[in-house]
């Protein structure tokens, strides 16, 4: 019996499509498409596998249910309601309508009800204000790939036979928290696969101009499809480019001891 990957590949070839053409239409990376057809998606999260299979099947004109175990087509669709419709009746206007409808209620009860509404309104306002203040205070400058970070001394990379080793000296905050912090800013589109402590948390294309940050307890494993198109920052230390533009580098291991780049 043919495997799922073999069946999909057979349909693709019958339609006269190349993996690159499918990649351009579905935005699924060519390496992932190839892995699907070779049934070699082992370390990828099942949720991602199911999503990629669904997109690929629909692109080829196939029913996902024949290839994804337990898949069911949605029976109904959710109607999008614009924000303007959802918020057509302001909170204060609604509260005013309710208050005027309570004329028959004794004055004391109405007063208590009004006080409760005022208390709820003030509580919501104070809660939102606290969130804004807390978010500003808890956003460390070190987590951003800013211009000031570029002015810091870059970590030197020393070459050995098959690996590059970079020693990263953590800052005091990282020593206290005992964590690894990785920031990636895309100077160009770059396909990235990222594992945090052995679990795949990101496997997609990071678009030009986007910045993402992650934290790990022990290790970070990274693969880049365009090594010269991204800037890395580990524990607030800017790492110089690990490769050329368009170069694929796999098995980049980041630990508290440093960075090992496999070739």
Image (cartoon, rainbow, N blue to C red):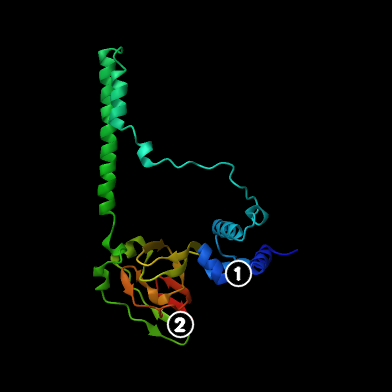
Where residue 197 appears, x then y in whole percent?
A: 47, 64
Is 40 rendered above or below residue 103? Answer: below
Q: Measured along the vertical axis of the image, is residue 76 above or below residue 246?
A: above
Residue 239 location (% of width, % of height): 34, 75
- x then y, percent, for residue 196: 46, 63
Total numbered labels placed on residues in the image: 2
| Residue 159 visible, this angle | yes
Instruction: Write down the quadrant of residue 18 in the picture.
Output: bottom right
Question: Mark 1, residues whose alpha carbon is within 10 Å: few (<14), some, or many (≥20)?
Answer: few
Q: Is residue 225 above or below residue 5?
A: below
Q: Between marks 1 and 2, how big is the CA–CA gap?
A: 38 Å
Q: Residue at x 27, y 30 (%)?
A: 119
Q: Residue furthest front?
A: 16
SS of the residue under disc 2: strand
In the depicted view, which residue is nearer to us: 47 or 94?
94
Q: Position of residue 169 (x, y in %)?
A: 33, 73
Identify the residue shown where x is 66% and y is 57%.
67
Determine which residue is flagged by label 1. 17
Which residue was labeled with disc 2?
Answer: 163
């Amino acid at each position: 019996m043919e495997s799922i990957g073999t069946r999909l590949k057979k349909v693709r070839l019958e339609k006269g499509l190349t993996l690159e053409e499918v990649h351009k239409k579905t935005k699924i990376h060519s390496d992932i498409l190839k892995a699907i057809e070779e049934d070699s998606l082992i370390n990828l999260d099942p949720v991602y596998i199911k999503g990629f299979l669904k997109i690929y099947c629909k692109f080829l004109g196939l029913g996902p249910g024949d290839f994804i175990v337990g898949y069911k087509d949605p029976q109904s669709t959710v109607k999008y309601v614009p924000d303007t419709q959802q918020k057509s009746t302001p909170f204060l206007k609604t509260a005013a309508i309710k208050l005027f409808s309570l004329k028959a209620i004794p004055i004391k009860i109405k007063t208590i009800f009004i006080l409760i509404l005022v208390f709820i309104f003030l509580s919501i306002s104070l809660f939102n204000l606290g969130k804004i203040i807390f978010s500003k205070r808890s956003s460390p400058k070190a987590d951003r790939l800013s211009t000031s970070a570029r002015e810091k001394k870059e970590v030197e990379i020393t070459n050995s036979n098959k690996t590059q080793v970079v020693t990263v000296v953590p800052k005091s905050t990282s020593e206290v928290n005992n964590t690894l912090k990785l920031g990636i800013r895309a100077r160009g589109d770059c396909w990235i696969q990222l594992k945090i402590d052995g679990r795949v948390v990101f496997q997609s294309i990071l678009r030009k101009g986007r910045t993402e940050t992650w934290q790990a307890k022990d290790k970070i494993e990274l693969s880049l499809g365009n090594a010269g198109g991204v800037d890395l920052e580990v524990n607030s230390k800017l790492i110089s480019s690990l490769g050329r533009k368009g170069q694929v580098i796999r098995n980049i291991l980041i630990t508290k001891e440093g960075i090992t780049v496999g070739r």
